[in-house]
Image: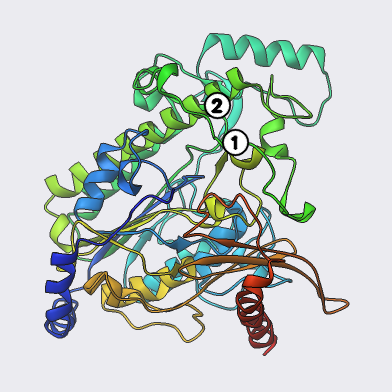
Amino acid sequence: MRTSRSVFLSAAVIAACSVFSCRAEVSAKTVAPKNVLFIAVDDLRLQGNIFGQDNMKTPNLDRLCAEGVVFNRAYCNVPVCGASRACLLSGVRPTADRFLGFAAKKDEDMPSVPSLGKWFREQGYITLSNGKIYHHANDDLKAWSEPLFDPPRNKTFGEEWSMYQSPESGRLIAEYGAQNPGEKRAKTPVVEAADVPDEGYPDGRLTQKVIEDMRRLSKQDQPFFLTAGFWKPHLPFCAPKKYWDLYSDDEIKLADNQYKPENAPKQAMHKWQELRNYLDVPQKGPVPPDMQKKLVHGYYACVSYVDAQVGKLLDELEALGLKENTIVILWGDHGWHLGEHSLWAKHCNFNRVLNAPLIVSAPGLSQGLQTEAITEFIDIYPSLCDLAGIKKPDHLAGTSFVPVLQNPARSVKEYAFCRFQKGESVVSATYNYTEWYNYKTGEVDARMLYNLDKDPAENTNISENPEYAGVVKKMSDQLSALRQELKK
């Protein structure tokens, strides 16, 4: 059953009644440029207290939600790291020819348009990139006022920026290397729970760097656009032991729909090779239940670890007196499967993967509210421009969601458009429709439709059900219209 995400009506009514005064207030306040704290979290799915479920412990994300607006229906435009980030940061839609996969780069696919970071820099901001903002460290280097801080993470053991800190992991890595000399991609442990402080892993060190930047920037008159790109909960699931200890195996619940959706086309499924690249993960077939528990436990631990780092940033922002003049935005580049439909990772067109976290806290606007407004990640660029009080470049394809921040009961668009490889999706308040369109023949090779109200887990594809023929046509027409628009 779909978790209730209703907006707190009393606050929404107040916001609706005062929307025009809110606009005036925003306009007046943005005379003094706002700072931006831009937090990206890799592979973060919609789950946790902030999204209506209580099986992940995220007190600091909950705290950020209490200070802003949670977008329950935010959608990444491409569900894979490289393309999702390059698309969001350039502010343009993906097509059949650009932002195709994890290798996508803004500099290659849209070199002629200013990125979000570069635009803010051109408007007089100090722009700093820390951690995983783009998928590729060498992408869009001119966007930043200083050399980006993105230390290479490696799969060796015990080094300063190593993913692994446990001696047991070191032994397994060395053992595999000795047994498989010359292998291009060495397999490493899929989980680790080393008894180390937060700074023992890369995300803890990254947090220290962002705090140092914050302290330095607080002494300057120039507004800043400061980023923090956390690597977890991306695989491998490595986090300090104390975060693993927040959960017991008895608490870990496995997906209850570990099967291919009824009537789903073969194109909808994938072999989740990203997970199979790690030690002990089966190369074929399903993950055994005991390993599933270990993986889910590891994912939860990594989320709680990143949550603690976010808390440190929020604490420092407040301690430095920057909170009242800083926009805080936190987003996850796409969702993630933890065994639902017997799938793991991203790389598909199901709602669990397309629907991604977005939380925005802006001075003078709504706090502690949730919204069901359909939102796309390409909307982030124009929205931050409006919130900061700077002009927008002409190339943007997204729509500012500032009206939603003023009144979370509002919406600024009816559909979100997403794509992965040949699958093109359009999502409305009620439906997720995907078709695999053949650009050579002009035919639709396969399609799927899910009623998210009646079937939120997307267990039954109803695209061939005559009862929904009108919905299929309407949604398909939306995709056709978008294809024509993108040809211009």
| 372 lies above or below 27 | above
Residue visible at 63% across and 57% down in the picture: 349
Q: Name the mark nearer the viewer: 2 or 1.
A: 1
- Sooner in the amino-acid sequence: mark 2 or mark 1: 2
Quadrant of the frame with the C terminus: bottom right
Classify mark 2: helix, strand or loop. Answer: helix
Q: Amino acid at mark 2?
A: Leu
Q: Amino acid at mark 1?
A: Gly
Q: In this orientation, which residue lies closer to the viewer: 302 or 479?
A: 479
Q: Which of the 4 quarters of the picture holds residue 19?
A: bottom left
| 231 lies above or below 301 | below
Q: Which of the 4 quarters of the picture holds residue 70?
A: bottom left
The reply to whether the C-beta atoms of the residues labelled 2 and 1 are less than 8 Å apart is yes
Q: Position of residue 131 (x, y in %)?
A: 46, 45
- Location of mark 2 (residue): 295
Q: In this orientation, which residue lies closer to the viewer: 384 or 440?
A: 440
**454 with respect to 4 (left or right):** right
- Location of mark 1 (residue): 339
Residue visible at 52% across and 61% down in the picture: 76
